[in-house]
Protein backbone atom coordinates (compact mmCIF):
# COMPACT_ATOMS: atom_id res chain seq x y z
CA UNK A 1 0.00 0.00 0.00
CA UNK A 2 1.22 3.44 -0.74
CA UNK A 3 1.74 5.98 1.98
CA UNK A 4 -0.82 8.30 0.46
CA UNK A 5 -3.46 5.56 0.75
CA UNK A 6 -2.77 5.34 4.52
CA UNK A 7 -3.06 9.10 4.80
CA UNK A 8 -6.48 8.95 3.14
CA UNK A 9 -7.63 6.35 5.68
CA UNK A 10 -6.48 8.47 8.59
CA UNK A 11 -8.72 11.28 7.35
CA UNK A 12 -11.72 8.97 7.69
CA UNK A 13 -11.09 8.38 11.40
CA UNK A 14 -12.93 10.73 13.67
CA UNK A 15 -13.72 10.89 17.33
CA UNK A 16 -17.14 11.06 18.93
CA UNK A 17 -16.42 14.70 19.68
CA UNK A 18 -15.74 15.31 15.96
CA UNK A 19 -19.11 13.80 15.07
CA UNK A 20 -20.96 15.64 17.81
CA UNK A 21 -19.51 18.87 16.48
CA UNK A 22 -21.47 18.30 13.25
CA UNK A 23 -24.81 18.30 15.04
CA UNK A 24 -26.85 21.47 15.24
CA UNK A 25 -29.11 22.45 18.08
CA UNK A 26 -32.09 24.75 18.22
CA UNK A 27 -31.94 25.85 21.83
CA UNK A 28 -34.96 26.27 24.03
CA UNK A 29 -34.94 28.36 27.20
CA UNK A 30 -37.07 25.74 28.89
CA UNK A 31 -35.39 22.49 29.96
CA UNK A 32 -36.91 19.21 28.81
CA UNK A 33 -35.11 17.36 31.62
CA UNK A 34 -35.93 17.40 35.33
CA UNK A 35 -33.85 15.81 38.06
CA UNK A 36 -35.29 15.08 41.48
CA UNK A 37 -32.25 16.20 43.45
CA UNK A 38 -33.28 14.53 46.72
CA UNK A 39 -33.62 11.13 45.03
CA UNK A 40 -30.39 11.76 43.09
CA UNK A 41 -28.51 12.23 46.38
CA UNK A 42 -29.64 8.79 47.56
CA UNK A 43 -28.34 7.06 44.40
CA UNK A 44 -24.97 5.61 45.39
CA UNK A 45 -23.81 4.86 41.81
CA UNK A 46 -25.01 8.07 40.19
CA UNK A 47 -24.66 6.29 36.85
CA UNK A 48 -26.43 9.09 35.04
CA UNK A 49 -23.20 11.08 35.26
CA UNK A 50 -21.38 8.44 33.21
CA UNK A 51 -23.83 7.06 30.66
CA UNK A 52 -24.86 10.17 28.75
CA UNK A 53 -22.96 10.39 25.44
CA UNK A 54 -23.34 14.16 25.42
CA UNK A 55 -22.21 14.62 29.04
CA UNK A 56 -25.44 16.40 29.93
CA UNK A 57 -25.21 15.39 33.60
CA UNK A 58 -22.41 16.28 35.98
CA UNK A 59 -22.11 15.97 39.73
CA UNK A 60 -21.36 19.15 41.62
CA UNK A 61 -19.32 18.45 44.74
CA UNK A 62 -19.87 22.01 45.87
CA UNK A 63 -23.67 21.85 45.75
CA UNK A 64 -23.95 18.07 46.11
CA UNK A 65 -26.42 17.95 43.25
CA UNK A 66 -26.71 16.94 39.63
CA UNK A 67 -26.07 19.72 37.14
CA UNK A 68 -27.96 19.41 33.85
CA UNK A 69 -26.76 20.90 30.57
CA UNK A 70 -29.97 20.07 28.72
CA UNK A 71 -28.90 22.12 25.70
CA UNK A 72 -26.46 19.35 24.69
CA UNK A 73 -28.99 16.51 24.74
CA UNK A 74 -28.89 14.12 21.77
CA UNK A 75 -32.34 12.70 22.55
CA UNK A 76 -31.06 9.12 22.76
CA UNK A 77 -33.17 8.26 25.82
CA UNK A 78 -30.41 6.43 27.70
CA UNK A 79 -30.90 8.43 30.89
CA UNK A 80 -34.53 7.33 31.06
CA UNK A 81 -33.29 3.78 31.42
CA UNK A 82 -30.30 4.51 33.67
CA UNK A 83 -32.08 6.70 36.20
CA UNK A 84 -35.84 6.34 35.88
CA UNK A 85 -36.33 7.03 39.60
CA UNK A 86 -35.12 10.60 39.49
CA UNK A 87 -34.70 11.73 35.87
CA UNK A 88 -37.78 12.91 34.06
CA UNK A 89 -36.96 13.29 30.40
CA UNK A 90 -39.32 14.48 27.68
CA UNK A 91 -38.76 15.32 24.05
CA UNK A 92 -37.97 19.01 23.58
CA UNK A 93 -40.84 21.22 22.56
CA UNK A 94 -41.71 21.20 18.88
CA UNK A 95 -39.02 22.76 16.70
CA UNK A 96 -36.35 22.65 19.43
CA UNK A 97 -33.56 20.18 20.12
CA UNK A 98 -30.89 18.41 18.13
CA UNK A 99 -30.74 18.35 14.36
CA UNK A 100 -28.56 15.49 13.17
CA UNK A 101 -26.25 15.73 10.21
CA UNK A 102 -24.40 12.94 8.51
CA UNK A 103 -20.92 12.51 9.87
FE1 LIG B 1 -27.98 12.31 27.52
FE2 LIG B 1 -29.35 10.76 25.88
FE3 LIG B 1 -30.43 11.52 28.21
FE4 LIG B 1 -30.10 13.31 26.26
S1 LIG B 1 -31.46 11.52 26.23
S2 LIG B 1 -29.60 13.60 28.41
S3 LIG B 1 -28.17 12.59 25.33
S4 LIG B 1 -28.62 10.21 27.94
Image (tube, grey):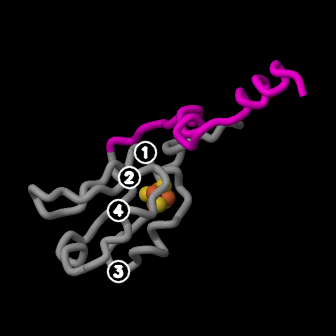
Query: Bounds of the magenta span?
Result: 1-29
Membership of 74 in magenta stretch: no
What's the distance in space between the residues labelled 3 and 2, CA to CA? 17 Å
Q: Which residue occupies 52% across, 64% down?
A: 77
Label 4 CB sits under 8 Å from any ligand 1 atom: no
Q: Are marks 1 and 4 in contact (CB under 8 Å)?
A: no
**Spot occupied by residue 42 in the image (x, y as percentages of width and height):** 21, 80
Q: What mark, if any, has residue 49 been given in the picture?
A: 4
Q: Are marks 3 and 4 in contact (CB under 8 Å)?
A: no
Give 26 or 5, whichever is nearer the viewer: 5
Q: Which residue occupies 31% across, 63% down?
A: 34
Query: Which residue, given by chain and number where applicable, does mark 2 sit on?
Result: 56
What's the distance in space between the residues labelled 2 and 4, CA to CA? 8 Å
**Spot occupied by residue 3 in the image (x, y as percentages of width and height):** 81, 21
Of the two numbered discs 3 and 4 on the same chain, state the one appearing first in sequence: 4
Query: Which residue, given by chain and number where applicable, does mark 1 sit on?
Result: 72
What's the distance in space between the residues labelled 3 and 1, CA to CA? 22 Å
- Examine the image and state in which quarter residue 58 appears: bottom left
- Left or right of 90? Residue 99 is right
In the structure shown, which secondary structural element does the residue marked by tag 2 occupy? loop
**Spot occupied by residue 18 in the image (x, y as percentages of width and height):** 57, 34
Pick out the residue farthest to the left.
Answer: 62
Foreground mark, 2 or 4? Answer: 4
What's the distance in space between the residues labelled 3 and 4, CA to CA? 14 Å
What's the distance in space between the residues labelled 1 and 4, CA to CA? 14 Å
- Left or right of 9? Residue 89 is left
Q: Are marks 1 and 2 in contact (CB under 8 Å)?
A: yes
In the structure shown, which secondary structural element does the residue marked by tag 3 occupy? loop
Amino acid sequence: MSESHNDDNSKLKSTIEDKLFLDKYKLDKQSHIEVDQEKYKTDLLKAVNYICPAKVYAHSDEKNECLVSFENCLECGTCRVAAPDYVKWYYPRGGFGVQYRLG
